[in-house]
Image (spheres, rainbow, N blue to C red):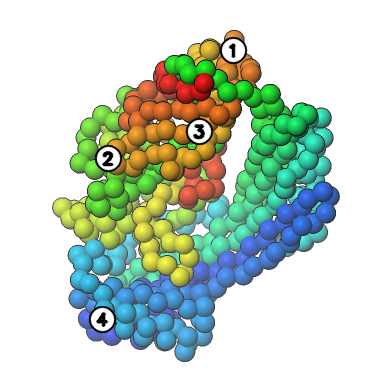
Amino acid sequence: MGELLDLATSALVGAQGGEAVEAYAVHGVATSVAVYGGEVETLTSAETRGVGVRVVVDRRLGFASSSDVTPPGLERALAQARSNAAFGTPDVGNVLPEPAPWEPMPAILVPGLESVPAARKVELALELERATLAADPRVRAVQRATYGDGISRAAVASTTGVSAEYARSDVYAYVSALARAGEETQTGFGLTTGRSVAELDIAAAAAEGAARAARLLGARKPATTTVPVVFDPLVTAQFLGVLASMFSAEAVQKGRSLFAGRLGDQVADAGLSIVDDGRLLDGPAAAPVDDEGVPTRRTVLVEDGVLRRFLHDTETAARDGDGTTSTGNASRAGHTSTPGVGPSNLFLDGTAVPVADILAAADGGLYVQDVSGLHSGVNPVSGEFSVGVTGLWVRGGELAEPVREATVSSTIVEMLRAVAMLGEDRRFFPVGGSLAGATLLLGFMTVGGT
């Protein structure tokens, strides 16, 4: 540690009077293995290293990036960012953050990943494929079994005094199982994640993929009805991903969120809270600082059903004024992009109960396992919600006959207010930042079918 921060700091050397300069440096090493039919389909290793430079002059912003991290390369990036700033439009939001104390999070980097041989990574993917095929006789094939890992390092330095660096390790294994009965085929996923290879549970991921595929065989289109609806943890996470964009201060300021102008309003069930926590070690996106070097933190967006806060980076906080500060939610796609607002580890909070209790309470309802058309089926301004779903009926506290080609319709606020029970099976999915799902019981909803 320290080398990357030195690199970011060296990119500031040519800063001129009257301008604020920031350098964001990254170094990442990643491996991905995909197998099919007992053979390696792809094996890739990639290394990324680069610096993004922001220059602010008279509230005008310029940006440039470079993968050439030699002194001449950094000089060129700074000169290009400065040149681009001359063509920028003055904006009160064009400001760099001031430094603030931050606490390291050494636990997000588990040593040893770099020494795991490629042969071991290939074997883990093959093991996942074999275990999935053996988990259920109805699973006739595996669409793909994948192992992936990465060590990512990031550093931020600026002329305002920001100076921060961290490293994180991530490991995952994913399988897509194919179950068949006659001419019918159903798919199901299995996933396991961790910070090290030792944390992966290959057997659990295989069993999950096989079960999710096999239990959908024989699915039929239902008659239209109104019943309790239960969301699978993945579906809950996907639903939360839709909400994440609506909690962005950037979307609110642009009038693209149904929550605009509703701070202090009751927008969800009184027992439900929605929290973003960049320091939660269980979340894949945990980090001590965001992508501007602002310390991460726990931000309660909805507290006991009441909308309390939006997610901010430095730009949106400056636009809001009135003492608004960044929530530590600046996010970048890499060194080639400027920061924007994004969630870190986003999850639902409240009294959690056993999943068995939820299924018992949802007798006669629909358990939604998969959704389709989620983003196109949700209006972020009106909150109208209509998506295709696949799932299973709930009978006597157990999952029963499978359902296909159904739709669920409502509005975002109505759904949040209809949350009746939250499962204690919370797990994080490394998508869109890091979104947590748990089994979720909603009140009565219209399920469209025949």
Q: CA distance from mark 2 to mark 3?
A: 25 Å
Secondary structure category for the residue under label 4: loop
What residue type is disc 1 on? Arg
Q: Which residue is mark 2?
A: 259
Nearest the eye: 165 or 345: 345
Residue 113 in picture, x, y percent from top left:
68, 58
Secondary structure category for the residue under label 1: strand
Which quadrant of the structure image shows residue 95? bottom left
Mark earlier in primary sequence (4, 1): 4
Q: Residue furthest front?
A: 450
Residue 213 in picture, x, y percent from top left:
69, 32
Mark earlier in primary sequence (2, 1): 2
Q: Mark on residue 388?
A: 3
What residue type is disc 4 on? Ala
Q: Is residue 124 above or below residue 13?
A: above
At a point 29% along the width and 67% down the height, the residue shown is 96
Tag 2: Cα neighbours inside 10 Å, few (<14), some, or many (≥20)? Answer: many
At a point 53% along the width and 12% down the height, the residue shown is 363
> Circles 3 and 4: CB distance less than 8 Å?
no
The quadrant the N terminus occupies is bottom right
Tag 1: Cα neighbours inside 10 Å, few (<14), some, or many (≥20)? Answer: some
Judge depth for marks 3 and 4 and give the one in front: 3
Q: Which residue is mark 4?
A: 86
Secondary structure category for the residue under label 2: loop
Mark earlier in primary sequence (3, 1): 3
What residue type is disc 3 on? Gly
Residue 326 in picture, x, y percent from top left:
30, 55
Tag 3: Cα neighbours inside 10 Å, few (<14), some, or many (≥20)? Answer: many
